[in-house]
Image (tube, rainbow, N blue to C red):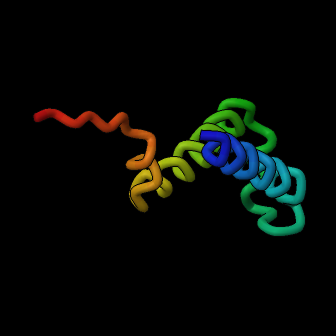
Amino acid sequence: MISLHISFIFSLALTAIFIAGIEIWSFPLIIIRENKILLVLFIVFTAIAHLAGLQREGVFVGFRKTEYER
């Protein structure tokens, strides 16, 4: 479960780095930093997209509770 938190925090850190350097990498996307609603939506979508990618790979399968019935 800790690795899930680490990957979530890492994705948020990469999002913050991208937003901080958006003038360098993609100047037409500067509207994301200027509009607060778009900024929040971008951060949330990036974090959720990262977790959805992990789910697609089957990472959450290990978090299930196993039950054995006879």
Side of 41 relative to 39 (left or right): left
Side of 30 relative to 58 (left or right): right
Residue sitting nearer the eye, 17 or 51 = 51
Residue sitting nearer the eye, 70 or 39 = 70
Residue 26, horizontal then vertical, whole percent: 77, 66
Residue 64, horizontal then vertical, whole percent: 37, 39
Side of 18 relative to 44 (left or right): right
Q: In this figure, what is the number of numbered marks?
A: 0
Residue at image position (59%, 40%) is: 1
Residue sitting nearer the eye, 51 or 26 = 51
Could you say which quadrant of the image residue 41 lies in?
Answer: top right
Side of 34 relative to 45 (left or right): right
Residue 23, horizontal then vertical, whole percent: 87, 60
Q: Which residue of the protein is positioned furthest toward the front in this rendering?
A: 70
Residue at image position (88%, 59%) is: 21
Query: Is residue 29 depicted above or below 12 in this figure?
Result: below
Residue at image position (22%, 36%) is: 68
Residue at image position (10%, 35%) is: 70
Q: Which residue of the protein is positioned furthest toward the bottom in this rendering?
A: 25
